[in-house]
């Protein structure tokens, strides 16, 4: 199979296993491309992509923009801070105004869960979700699992623990869907207040003890404590969180096996992960960033292949 | 209709190898690149025979995928699947021999040249093909080394089979009955 079963990338939930495998395979080819002296292919030279970021982002936006440029697409950027959204324009109006300038694809980050799906129903462009509220962040999950697969060869039967703020994390939800579709076992670990009440419905294990979780897993994905989403106190203090759930070199060295440490960034050094762990040989944080560009190129390329050409 | 059987194919490959040796000697400044997916089989054959004939142990050779450089992206119903690119050497300032099995419209070679140039600026590029369908060219591209020239029309198809994948070395011309066959 060489094309995706979906027309938009809204969430991992809607992908088939074969779609994910196709994205991995295509991303491997693009990873090769971005390591050449000339890191660019002409595939999307007749495609225009709008990056609409209604919520702050640095690395995801840069990663998408670089992926688009490596594919030779034309790129326009928009962030809500400086836009008409503040003047009261609706989402559909904003997007339709942008599409009137002949845009073929939209990469969107939005604070409201479901915004990319809503858009895909109402506008004529391919939509890529770059994070919608606390719902999904599909390209992050694809690059995380791609990085694990690159390190361990396969995801089938592998044990992955996601540590931290599961309640507010779109990275966690997308990762859970993606890992399970690829046959990995998932555990979530964090303070009880940051684990959603009905998380068991997703078929994941739950632990409130970091050491127990680390002893079980092959890979630990340490999430950032999202201070901007903590509108109430979920734990007494950052210091206490760090003592209970922060990953230190001491814990890592006391484990029986060498586990892989991941972090989607940006890191709060000394909170969820100490500096010596983040910079250790077991950490693949920078590989994740490199793979992010390749995976996003694969997603954009495969979705662009579904755009009908005007003849 | 069978165009070449195993024996004829073997004679042609040997002849092509001798022509390459005539121009490139011990391959010190020459690298060989097979185009994915089908050109790599021919490239491997040629490299192993060149090593036998010249006694040189090391001839740099690799595989190049051209999927992302094609000019028919979004023009076909089915997207082409990408293959691996494996070029573990420098091509800057060297002679490059591009190898493919069948030269038809020339569009694959055009894409191959673009893809190859992302690895550097070679001194000189030559093209070797097993089958040249000479009346079907869309672009001004001609091979430097040709196995066999075939006069065929657009509705026909030429297939090159290899022992490694199809069980037998041979070249066959198919008359297409329908578009999909």
Image: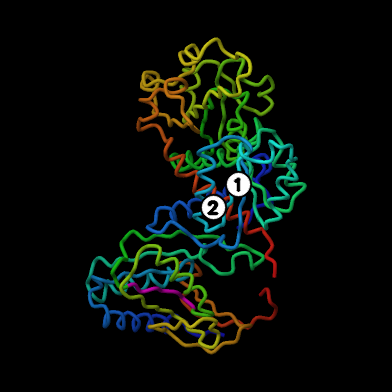
> Badge 1 is on which residue?
A51
In the rendered image, residue A187, in percent from the top left (x then y), is placed at 56, 25
On screen, residue A198 versus residue B19, left or right, reads right
Quarter of the view holding residue B112 = bottom left
Image position of A100 with respect to B100: above or below: above
Quarter of the view holding residue B156 = bottom right
In the rendered image, residue B85, in percent from the top left (x then y), is placed at 43, 60
Going from the N terminus, do you reach mark 1 or mark 2 first? Answer: 1
Indicate whether residue B100 is drawn in magenta. yes
Image position of A12 with respect to A251: above or below: below
Nearer-the-camera pick, B85 or A289: A289
In the rendered image, residue A299, in percent from the top left (x then y), is placed at 58, 50
In the rendered image, residue B34, in percent from the top left (x then y), is placed at 41, 69
Segment colored magenta: B96-102
> Badge 2 is on which residue?
A68
Q: What element carries label 2?
A: helix
Residue at 36%, 30% in the rendered image: A279
Q: Which residue lies furthest to the top in this view?
A: A236
């Amino acid at each position: 199979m060489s094309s995706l079963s979906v027309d938009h990338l809204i969430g991992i939930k809607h992908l088939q296993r074969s779609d994910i495998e196709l994205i991995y395979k295509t991303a491997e080819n693009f990873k090769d491309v971005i390591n050449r002296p000339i890191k660019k292919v002409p595939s999307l030279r007749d495609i225009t992509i709008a990056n609409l970021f209604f919520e702050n982002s640095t690395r995801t936006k840069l990663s998408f923009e670089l992926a688009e440029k490596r594919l030779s697409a034309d790129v326009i950027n928009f962030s809500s801070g400086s836009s008409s959204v503040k003047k009261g324009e609706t989402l559909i109006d904003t997007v339709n105004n942008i599409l009137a300038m002949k845009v073929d694809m939209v990469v969107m980050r939005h604070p409201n869960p479901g915004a990319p799906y809503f858009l895909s129903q109402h506008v004529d462009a391919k939509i890529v979700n770059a994070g919608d509220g606390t719902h999904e962040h599909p390209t992050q999950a694809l690059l995380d699992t791609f990085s694990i697969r690159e390190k361990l060869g396969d995801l089938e039967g592998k044990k992955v623990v996601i540590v931290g703020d599961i309640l507010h994390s779109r990275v966690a939800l997308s990762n859970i869907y993606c890992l399970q579709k690829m046959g990995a076992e998932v555990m979530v670990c964090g303070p009880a207040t940051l684990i959603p009440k009905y998380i068991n419905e997703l078929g994941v294990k739950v632990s409130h003890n970091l050491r127990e979780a680390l002893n079980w897993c092959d890979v630990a994905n340490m999430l950032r404590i999202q201070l901007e989403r903590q509108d109430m106190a979920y734990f007494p203090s950052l210091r206490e969180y760090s003592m209970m759930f922060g990953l230190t070199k001491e814990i890592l060295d006391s484990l029986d096996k060498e586990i892989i440490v991941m972090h989607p960034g940006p890191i709060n050094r000394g909170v969820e992960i100490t500096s010596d762990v983040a910079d250790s040989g077991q950490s693949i944080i920078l590989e994740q960033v490199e793979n992010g560009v390749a995976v996003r190129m694969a997603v954009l390329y495969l979705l662009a292949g579904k755009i009908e050409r005007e003849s | 209709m069978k165009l070449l059987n195993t024996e004829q194919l073997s004679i042609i490959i040997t002849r092509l190898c001798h022509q390459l040796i005539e121009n490139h000697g011990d391959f010190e400044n020459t690298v060989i690149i097979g185009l994915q997916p089908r050109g790599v089989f021919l490239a491997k054959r040629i490299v192993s025979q060149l090593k036998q004939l010249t006694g040189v142990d090391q001839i740099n050779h690799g595989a190049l995928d051209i999927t992302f450089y094609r000019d028919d992206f979004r023009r076909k119903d089915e997207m082409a699947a990408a293959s691996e690119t494996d070029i573990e050497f420098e091509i800057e300032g060297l002679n490059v021999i591009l190898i493919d099995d069948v030269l038809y419209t020339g569009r694959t070679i055009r894409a191959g040249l673009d893809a190859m140039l992302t690895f550097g600026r070679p001194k000189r590029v030559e093209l070797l093909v097993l089958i040249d369908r000479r009346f079907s060219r869309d672009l001004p591209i001609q091979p430097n080394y040709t196995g066999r020239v075939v006069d065929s029309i657009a509705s026909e198809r030429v297939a090159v089979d290899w022992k490694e994948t199809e069980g037998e070395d041979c070249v066959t011309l198919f008359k297409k009955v329908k578009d999909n066959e």
